[in-house]
Image (cartoon, coloured by chain):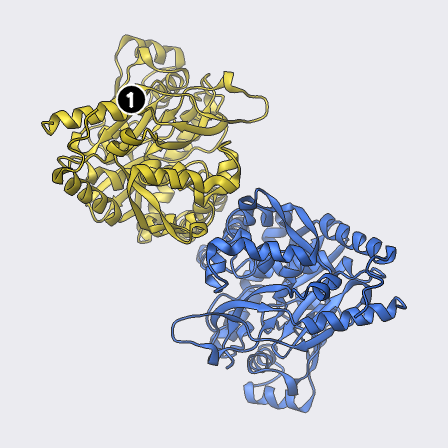
Chain colours: A blue, B yellow
């Protein structure tokens, strides 16, 4: 691989612009609306999923389970087996969330009637969308599709989503950059640990929720639902990541990664100077710790759009902020968490001055992954991830660390070189 | 100072029992009731205050301001000047909170009609009490006493206190040991930084509050009041500390510190084997950082019962958990926060296996201050503290670190030696 163009002014200037847009972003959680309202191009029978493009025949077990479940939820099939038959027949349109301004955790199902969190990036003028976190256990993002899963999605659509939407509209929205900054001082890295930001978000939302929800029993149920889910903020972190990164796309010559994502079969990245093209490789298995009763044999390969948080310098890149997560994901001793952040500094272009880590004397998180640095150093981005059971609907069986496959970056670098005429 | 008895079986066994009681404690936040109900010995005209005993003539400015204010609040005086005259005449009974199972931050006013948080120590069977945190700015704990301060105390008494009480009774109480354990993974040290525990407490209380408060506007006001105060949990941390330490008192021969406290004039400690005797010295000035517009000239000497949190291994003792607080209190670089925890390990008898610090690979907080170790090493307990303006009612002007005066420990050690016949 030639790096003869690595010092080119074009790339340097393009990357400087990319990093500038990342650091200037002003993501604000402004609303919850139905996906059909947020994304006018969504159609009947269209299913947005996590990761790069994939069709039914190559989907992993949990992704298929989620597809069947969401089809029943949307009323496109009477039951799961009819849904599978329709999928098999090729009648559903499968599209990546990323193509529609959206992201979704794990299987990442996004369809017409689901409520989506809306984050507006006030510096870019763009909006991004993500469904609401369903909680732990048997949930659709892990391929769950039984009656309890469908019922909860109905409650999110009919009750919680509209309530959060009203609360956000009657407030002034919630400024997320400073919320994440606080989370970094509270041991969150915003991927596998969100207890700080989830709690801060709830305390910000609670007064407006109580003004907007008239039924006290329903209100209590909503507060308990949000309050009992330490990962509630994950979907917010993801959509703020998408809102930050979309304006970074399509800067001619830039070698900055704008998305990393996986569909349970393929891992894909997008690069600013290469527009919407995906550079893919087979997704890897996470290495990590399993919950009691589970082992690596139960694990599904890595999945979800949640790697958008690493793309903006959080997750594995911010491990130093979260020694507790280093233990949780089996990444070594908590006291060595800072090593991950330091190493990610070698493949990134900047430190974010607004997202800083107290234990590193307020050094900023490593920001702006440069595919040239990844290829030159051979250091793959570290991703903190939840591990799904390979069978649909069992849920999370562990947490671990996974590496982005280097081949994605090598492919992208070749494409960038060609595009720049090197 | 002779240490010839330092290896004595009596002391060793007594201290072992003291530490055992500390570690076995099971503090649960069970209720909010009026102080008169919680503390039957409270009388008309009796004012419980922070620190060791003190009378009006020796009280600092903020303490006097608070006394005048609370007398107006209780209806014992028409206005502040009448209250001061009554105080001057000697008609109020001033008593330490610690003598009545209570603690209070800063000036620490506790009187008949105030609502108090009730923590039950289920291993000791005892209860302890503390008023509800008033928020920041002009508040009675900093000597504030104008109409806004009195009005807020009325709202706490009439609205928020009863609501939290109902919420706690209709739930099963809130188990505090695990809450504090989580807080230690979220950057709290529970003295100058409580944002994690305050947020966790709110999310636990919110559903029951919403079931118990019928007026949605009032509910929203309560949720916003709690949610906007990062130090809301401080008073809970204090009362859980008191609930843990009271059963540790009066173990014959024990050299373990059961209370450290200050009234703005004197610093005092109590020692298990020496019952309710206070060993005092002039209180020191904190060294720290001042908020914009304030300087050391504005500072009042150190004040409050909040040092009970250091007595149980939190606050300055848990600095390693909270690199952000090390910066906030001006205790050096955040990355060197662990030094404080390590040094406090030299004057304590145990590590708390349930309160651990991720960045120290889950080492427990140093627990059980031994006056012999303090005197032998010359290492004074490190206390993280808020700095009050010396004039009543201005509020907090900074935060810093203060050392417990060594002379308190020397006096206590002499008394223990005498008592043990050395």
User: Does residue A385 appear in the picture of this structure?
Assistant: yes
Does residue B334 sit above or below B415 in this rendering? below
| Left or right of A311, for residue B246 | left
Query: Circle 1 — which element?
Result: helix
What residue is drawn where x is 23% and y is 27%? B42
What residue is drawn where x is 52% and y is 66%? A134
Front-most of A134 and B222?
A134
Percent x, y for residue B192? Answer: 45, 36
The number of callouts visible is: 1
Front-most of B305 and B314?
B314
Does residue A268 sit above or below B397 in this rendering? below
Percent x, y for residue B326? Answer: 49, 37
Does residue A80 sit above or below A279 in this rendering? below
Q: Residue furthest left?
A: B421
- The residue tagged 1 is B407
Front-most of B390 and A287?
A287
């Amino acid at each position: 691989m030639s790096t003869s163009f690595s010092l080119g002014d074009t790339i340097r200037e393009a990357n400087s612009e990319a990093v500038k847009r990342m650091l200037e972003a002003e993501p604000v959680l402004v609303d919850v609306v139905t996906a059909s309202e947020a994304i006018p191009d969504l159609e009947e029978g269209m299913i947005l999923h996590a990761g790069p493009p994939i069709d039914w025949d190559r989907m992993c077990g949990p992704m298929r389970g989620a597809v069947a479940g969401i089809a029943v939820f949307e009323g496109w099939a009477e039951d799961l087996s009819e849904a599978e038959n329709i999928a098999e027949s090729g009648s559903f349109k499968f599209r990546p969330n990323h193509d529609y301004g959206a992201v979704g955790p794990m299987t990442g199902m996004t369809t017409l009637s689901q409520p989506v969190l809306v984050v507006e990036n006030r510096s870019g003028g763009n909006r991004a969308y993500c469904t609401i976190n369903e909680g732990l256990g048997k949930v659709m993002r892990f391929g769950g599709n039984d009656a309890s899963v469908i019922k909860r999605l109905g409650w999110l659509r009919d009750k919680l989503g509209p309530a959060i939407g009203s609360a956000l509209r009657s407030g002034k929205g919630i400024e997320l950059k400073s919320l994440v900054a606080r989370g970094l001082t509270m041991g969150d890295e915003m991927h596998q640990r969100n207890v700080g930001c989830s709690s801060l978000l709830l305390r910000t939302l609670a007064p407006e929720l109580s003004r907007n929800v008239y039924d006290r029993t329903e209100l209590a149920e909503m507060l308990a639902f949000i309050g009992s889910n330490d990962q509630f903020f994950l979907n917010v972190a993801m959509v703020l990541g998408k809102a930050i990164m979309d304006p970074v796309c399509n800067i001619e010559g830039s070698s900055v990664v704008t998305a990393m994502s996986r569909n349970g079969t393929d891992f894909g990245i997008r690069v600013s100077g290469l527009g919407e093209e995906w550079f893919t490789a087979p997704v890897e298995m996470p290495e990590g710790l399993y919950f009691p009763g589970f082992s690596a044999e139960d694990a599904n390969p890595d999945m979800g759009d949640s790697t958008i948080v690493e793309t903006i310098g959080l997750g594995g890149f911010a491990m130093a902020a979260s020694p507790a997560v280093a233990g949780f994901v089996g990444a070594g001793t908590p006291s060595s968490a800072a090593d991950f952040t330091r190493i990610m500094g070698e493949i990134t272009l900047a430190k974010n001055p607004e997202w800083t880590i107290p234990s590193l004397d307020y050094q900023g998180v490593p920001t702006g992954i440069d595919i040239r640095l990844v290829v030159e150093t051979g250091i793959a981005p570290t991703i903190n991830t939840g591990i799904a059971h390979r069978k649909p609907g069992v849920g999370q069986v562990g947490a671990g660390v996974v590496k982005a496959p280097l081949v994605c970056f090598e492919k992208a670098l070749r494409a960038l070189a060609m595009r720049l005429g090197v």
